[in-house]
Image (cartoon, rainbow, N blue to C red):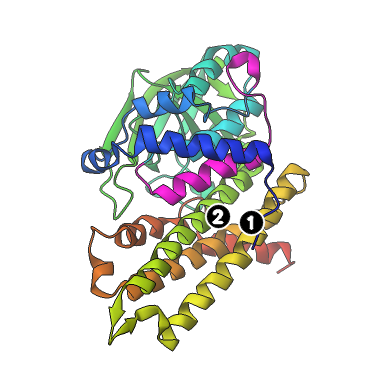
């Protein structure tokens, strides 16, 4: 089904992104997979291609374009390629909105030019060893001491945890404030007491530097408060929908690429004297996947239009996030089955997609949390 949400300028960015992938990522992807980390040079290259910070003000090196459809184009093309890419969705869709909306004039001057160029890599640290989906259970805390916040605690499952230069740390600054007691502090590379733990050994997405972070009496200057003190939870709730929509967009784009490859495989692979896709059961499975992907894609496009119109709600994003990631999991599983024994071989992209995509129903808010958000909105 033809998509109508994108315009000529989005198609142009799509072509630029494809060139970036072909020239700057594809030649190094296998090496990054082996090393367990994308090289920082990939972020600098992305900055030169204009793929980071295009939604930041032009005066700070950004593109001055606030249109989430541009974000979607980049997410889709990277998802089609696979996980051995720089974490541009993290930069543009997760960290970017905080940098664009919450920084004051001095912080903009200090951070945005390097962020847009790819010189400064951003991350956000929410999850803790004892607090994943339950943000209210966060233990990391900071106490004001003169003109510094003294930060202590640990975070885990932090995307770009090794490469990051600017880490937005969700910390409790009012021990009795409940949800109104959190503040966002920007911890910078090299601050005394800020240590990176182990790079986590994951099931998939091996090129992504997911890590533990530790903070021991880190003195964070008050100038590094992002947004307002004790308004951190509000800031998080405001920005999480864009992150969840980004995950949904990547889930469907990645699943569609796996489906497209599998469809061709079922036409080429023969058994009992005929292409395996022509067996009725396989044909029905392929028909179901094609239909479901089309339907999900239309909902995604409606969400994109809603973002442009300023109408996307947290509930809309939650629906998109859980449905598309669960669908991607199901589609890719079917595609492994259609490949037979070859689907279990790592030399086939479908095998890698199977383990790489599994995290999508978990990060950014689990499927269960998404359903809870939707249920509560229904008055339940």
Position of 107 with respect to 312 (left or right) is: left
Instruction: Between residue 141 and residue 186, name the one nearer to us.
Output: 186
Position of 263 with respect to 56 (left or right) is: left
Instruction: Between residue 170 and residue 114, name the one nearer to us.
Output: 114
Circle nearer the N terminus (1, 2):
2
Position of 319 with respect to 352 (left or right) is: right
Q: Establish if 83 lies above or below 163.
A: below
Magenta stretch encompasses residue 71: yes
Q: Which residues are magenta?
A: 57-84
Specify whether residue 65 is in view.
yes
* Quarter placement of the N terminus: bottom right
Say what secondary structure mark 2 lies in: helix
Label 2, on which residue?
A: 248
Magenta stretch encompasses residue 83: yes
Mark 1 packing: few (<14 Cα in 10 Å), some, or many (20+)?
many
Residue 126 point in image, percent of width and height: 48, 41
Query: What is the magenta segment's predominant secondary structure?
Result: helix
Label 1, on which residue?
A: 300
Q: Quadrant of residue 216?
A: top left
Q: Quadrant of residue 319?
A: bottom right
Mark 2 packing: few (<14 Cα in 10 Å), some, or many (20+)?
many
Q: Looking at the image, do the residues carrying marks 1 and 2 touch, with CB atoms under 8 Å apart?
A: yes
Q: Establish if 148 lies above or below 25.
A: above
Residue 261 point in image, percent of width and height: 40, 62
Name the residue at 39% across, 38% down: 22
Instruction: Between residue 84 and residue 366, name the one nearer to us.
Output: 84
């Amino acid at each position: 089904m033809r998509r109508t949400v994108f315009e000529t300028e989005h198609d142009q960015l799509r072509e630029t992104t494809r060139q970036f992938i072909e020239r700057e990522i594809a030649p190094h992807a296998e090496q990054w997979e082996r090393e367990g980390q994308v090289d920082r040079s990939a972020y600098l290259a992305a900055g030169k291609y204009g793929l980071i910070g295009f939604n930041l003000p032009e005066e700070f090196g950004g593109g001055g374009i606030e249109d989430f459809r541009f974000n979607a184009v980049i997410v889709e093309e990277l998802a089609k390629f696979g996980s051995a890419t720089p974490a541009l969705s993290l930069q543009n869709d997760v960290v970017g909105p905080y940098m664009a909306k919450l920084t004051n004039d001095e912080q903009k001057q200090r951070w945005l030019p390097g962020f847009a160029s790819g010189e400064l890599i951003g991350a956000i640290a929410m999850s803790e060893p004892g607090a994943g989906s339950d943000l209210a259970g966060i233990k990391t805390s900071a106490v004001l001491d003169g003109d510094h916040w003294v930060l202590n605690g640990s975070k885990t499952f932090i995307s770009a945890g090794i490469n990051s230069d600017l880490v937005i740390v969700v910390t409790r600054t009012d021990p009795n404030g409940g949800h109104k007691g959190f503040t966002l502090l920007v911890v910078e590379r090299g601050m005394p007491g800020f240590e990176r733990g182990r790079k986590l050994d994951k099931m998939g997405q091996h090129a992504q530097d997911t890590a533990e972070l530790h903070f021991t009496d880190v003195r964070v200057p008050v100038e590094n408060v992002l947004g307002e003190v004790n308004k951190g939870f509000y800031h998080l709730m405001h920005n999480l929908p864009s992150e969840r929509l980004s995950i949904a967009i990547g889930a469907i784009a990645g699943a569609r690429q796996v489906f497209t490859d599998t469809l061709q495989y079922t036409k080429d692979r023969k058994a009992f004297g005929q292409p395996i896709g022509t067996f009725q059961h396989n044909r029905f499975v392929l028909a179901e996947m094609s239909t479901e992907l089309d339907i999900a894609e239309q909902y995604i496009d409606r969400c994109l239009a809603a973002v442009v119109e300023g109408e996307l709600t947290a509930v809309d994003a939650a629906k998109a996030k859980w449905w598309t990631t669960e669908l991607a999991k199901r589609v890719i599983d079917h595609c492994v089955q259609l490949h037979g024994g070859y689907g279990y071989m790592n030399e086939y992209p479908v095998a890698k997609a199977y383990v790489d995509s599994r995290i999508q129903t978990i990060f950014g808010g689990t499927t269960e949390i998404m359903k809870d958000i939707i249920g509560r909105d229904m008055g339940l």
